[in-house]
Image: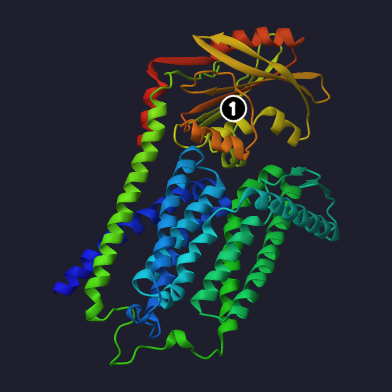
Amino acid sequence: MVRILQSTRSWLPLTFVLGYLWYSVIDQLRGEWTVNPQYSYGWVVPFLCVGLLLRRLQTCPDLKRRDTETRSQTSEVVWFALLAFLWLPTRLVEEANPEWRLISWALAIDVVALTLLSIRFTLGSAWARWLAFPICFVLVAVPWPTPIEGPLIQSLTRMNSAIVVELLGWAGIPAVQHGNLIEVATGTIGVSEACSGIRSFQTSLMISLFFGEFYRMGLWRRLLLIPAGFIMAMAFNVCRMTFLTLIAAEKGVDAIDKYHDTTGITITLVCTAGLWGLAMLFNRGRKSGIENQSLGAGSQKPGTPSPANFRAMSSALFRGSIAVLAWIVLVELGVESWYRWHEARLPKSVLWSMDWPRGNPTFEEVPLAPRTKQLLRYDEGSSAAWREADGTAWQMIYFHWLPGRIAVQLAKSHTPEICLPASGHTVETLPDITYLSVRGLNLPFRKYILNDGGGPVYVFYCLWEDRARDQSFQTTSLTYGNRLEPILEGRRNVGQRSLEIVIRGIGGLKAAEAALAQQLEKVITTDHAHTAGTELQNGRSG
């Protein structure tokens, strides 16, 4: 009984440390899993990791015990200390750039490595190798870096679109490919209506790796299962795109929404069933290997040290775990103190939002595409269009990012000069920023002239940072420099708002600016009773 209590006392601090680290990784990844449909499968990955881990433990051979290993532990201690130290810079960067995918990879790899080193230190290298795959399996749910994912999405989209257009041609249905788009008689189908296939590919990769481990296949069978899953996923996705395009050609592009999600779930289930059957076929007739060997009746349980070395290992494990736990607590307190100390010096800002002119008979609220939510990850968004009595047409798009939810760079990198050319428009960016005083706010607007063939269209874009010292914004691209700058300045995301206004049918830029100033007085509402400082506290606590 005393030995059991000593064992519990030794493992409890390490269990708490690893539990907190794994919680931090899942908490970091859950935003992508929730917002991005490509990675929605990530929610099941932690449960699959636990299942694979339990399966490994149930089928473990008589592994070499820790106390029989005579090599020095110095290298393990050094590596563990280095990985624990890296938690500090990683957390500092994460606070200012929570959506940065490289940080997600850094966190996940750090925690996986610390977990494997803990197993290696306490139970031995054989145990670490035996449990490595289930622990590393969580990496399949980490979002791919954008420089890799972006070109792959574009390539798969064009390839699938070309195949679908060819199939439609064989079926006698006219269709034309325009890059990533497919044009049929009833309209044009974009990526949002027919997915590129990257989601199917990533899901099939996860399923292939899972079944390869579940059936304890050899290396070559596992490697063969991955391309088989990819081919299967791409084939089903082409079938899905072809079906959706046929629906659009017959019933109109809007009819796709009725079948889009259903077909997506269907091909995922069918692909999973197909890979399962293929894995069972690969596994048929394979003789049981070392994974099915059981311990002899008189053998000591693997990983359990001899009584002579038990106290020494327990004492070292307890001291090391307490040291790591103290370091983790110190890191979290230090990171929070660093940002809060700088945030306390920021000025308070008046909150504002939109009060749409719903009394206007031409007012229409324009739904935002799901893809917009996926890309921008805003907390509040709305879009509206209407006409004034003088015949001018207005459209406004408002986004609000709460504190602590997303980094400021996303708001700064999705601006008209970036988004409008991507949609095929010719845009002239005017160099000067115009400041408009509205209800005590000094709103900065960047101006654009859009040429769409029907006369000039004037676009005004405002990016407002809550509690900023200076509201003069500059649009930025996501470079390493502007990723690291807010860390050095101790500036987390304290909340942003953006407002984009499109004006058509007005006589000149000066007239557009004057009309904009009058319109903003009608549609913007402010809340002087609550400041962005209060909202910041609410956002952090959430």
Q: To which quarter of the image does residue 81 belong?
A: bottom left
Q: Tell me which amino acid carries mark 1.
A: Ser
- Whether residue 128 is visible, yes or no, is yes
| Front-lying residue, 516 or 308 | 308
Residue 220: percent from left, percent from top: 63, 79
Quarter that holds the N terminus: bottom left
- Left or right placement of residue 503 versus residue 55 in this view: right
- What residue sits 43% from the left and 87% below the top? 292
| Front-lying residue, 101 or 255 | 101
Residue 199: percent from left, percent from top: 62, 56
- What residue sits 67% from the left and 70% below the top? 227
Quarter that holds the C terminus: top left
Q: How many marks?
A: 1
Residue assigned mark 1: 383
- Left or right placement of residue 505 versus residue 127 in this view: right
Image vertical order of residue 15 relative to residue 462, above or below: below
* Colouring style: rainbow
Residue 127: percent from left, percent from top: 40, 76
